[in-house]
């Protein structure tokens, strides 16, 4: 993506349309996931009114699960038996309510970051 082109489009449209609005278009930044912060700022400055960040949030969700697995791997190899003992239960580790929550936390943090990047806080 080349968000710097957006301002060129705005300038061209303003030249053709005339008037006082220097940003006659409201752009949607499709494919914005993975963009650098300076690219996001450039796009916002050129009239982007919406940016899709679905891929970023999906990845953030996965990262929460992956980090949980890596941290608790010894507890996620069977229902019974872990680093604390061969007879120790693991239900509290493989219970989806536990690892889904970890994914939700990392996704929430990513959404908050996107909101800041997009000047959409408060």
Image (cartoon, rainbow, N blue to C red):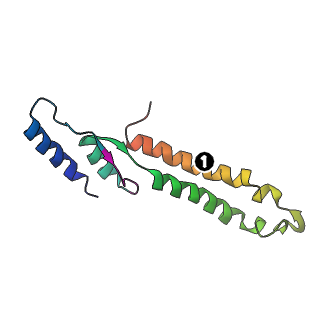
* For residue 113, side relative to residue 32 (left or right): right
* For residue 106, side relative to residue 30 (left or right): right
Q: Is residue 41 magenta?
A: no
Q: Main secondary structure of the magenta part?
A: loop
**Position in image of residue 29 (x %, y %):** 33, 48
Numbered disc 1: secondary structure: helix
Front residue of this view, candidates 9 and 98: 9
Name the image quarter holding the C terminus: top left
- Residue at the image position 57 percent from the left and 54 percent from the top: 61
Q: Classify 10 Å Cα crowding around label 1: few (below 14), some (14-19), many (20 and above).
A: some
- Residue at the image position 37 percent from the left and 53 percent from the top: 32
- Residue at the image position 22 percent from the left and 48 percent from the top: 6
- Residue at the image position 27 percent from the left and 39 percent from the top: 26
Q: Which residues are magenta?
A: 28-34
**Position in image of residue 78 (x %, y %):** 81, 69
Rendered view: 57 above or below 82: above
Number of numbered callouts drawn: 1
Toward the right, the furthest residue is 87
**Position in image of residue 45 (x %, y %):** 25, 41
* For residue 17, side relative to residue 62 (left or right): left
Rendered view: 20 above or below 69: above
Residue on which the image places disc 1:
105
Rendered view: 5 above or below 76: above
Name the image quarter holding the N terminus: bottom left
Front residue of this view, candidates 115 and 32: 32
Front residue of this view, candidates 119 and 55: 55
């Amino acid at each position: 993506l080349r968000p710097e082109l957006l301002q060129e489009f705005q300038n061209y449209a303003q030249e053709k349309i005339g008037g006082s609005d220097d940003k006659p278009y409201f752009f949607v930044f499709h494919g914005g996931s993975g963009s650098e912060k300076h690219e996001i700022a450039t796009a916002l400055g050129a009239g982007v009114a919406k940016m899709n960040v679905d891929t970023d949030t999906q990845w953030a969700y996965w990262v929460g699960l992956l980090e949980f697995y890596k941290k608790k791997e010894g507890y996620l190899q069977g229902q019974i038996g872990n680093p604390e003992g061969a007879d120790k239960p693991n239900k509290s580790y493989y219970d989806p309510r536990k690892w889904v929550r970890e994914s939700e936390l990392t996704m929430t943090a990513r959404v908050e970051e996107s909101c800041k990047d997009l000047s959409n806080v408060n």
